[in-house]
Image (tube, helix red, strand yellow):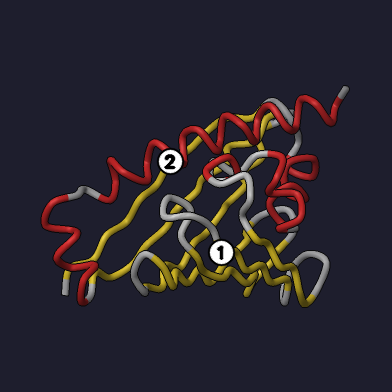
Amino acid sequence: MSTYEVTRKAIIPAEASEVFPLVNSFRNWTEWSPWEGMDPAMDRDYSGSESGVGARYAWSGNRKAGAGTMEIVESDEPITIRIRLEFTKPFKSVSPTVFTFAPSGSWTEVTWTMTGENKGIGRVFALFMNMDKMIGRDFEKGLASLRAAVARRQG
């Protein structure tokens, strides 16, 4: 089985307690997620908890946005958020995702990691596409947007 891991880091000039809530609630992802603009007509459904463990999000969009679900399965404020990410389109896969927040004075290093296995059609897809190159750019864009969202909230 072919596995992958995509990791990106960013330094955000804010305390972890200011950054953490933007990731810990899927409703806040519209402020920074790199995938929000892929389909302006994307259907979104929030369920479960408002934030933290049990918060769920489902989306269904165009070919670019695909479809899937996310659920926060661990939330250790303000250190770690673990998410069960399941894609249903364009192909089925489960990609555990982790955000860590390492405070350093008034700055926070945010690390975003997604892992997974390439099975079935995903395995064929992986022969032609490098997941790190493909998703890594999205993570970089998302972390830059997260930094901007924190700055907007700071006023």
Between label 1 and label 2, give the one nearer the viewer. Answer: 1
In what quadrant of the picture does the C terminus appear? top right
Say left or right for 112 vs 90: right
The residue singled out by tag 1 in the image is 60
Residue 32 x/y as whole percent:
65, 39
Mark identifier at residue 33: none
Name the residue: 71% across, 40% down.
Answer: 31
Eyeballing the image, is 104 above or below 76? above
Say left or right for 136 vs 101: left
Q: Residue furthest right?
A: 155
Q: Residue furthest top?
A: 155
Name the residue: 18% across, 68% down.
Answer: 123
Nearest to the observer: residue 77 or residue 5? 5
Q: How many marks?
A: 2
Residue 48 x/y as whole percent:
77, 77
Q: Amino acid at mark 2?
A: Arg
Eyeballing the image, is 148 above or below 130? above
Eyeballing the image, is 125 above or below 70? above
The residue singled out by tag 2 in the image is 8
Circle 1: is it few (<14), some (14-19), or many (20+) Cα within 10 Å?
some
> Sequence order check: which comes first, mark 1 or mark 2?
2
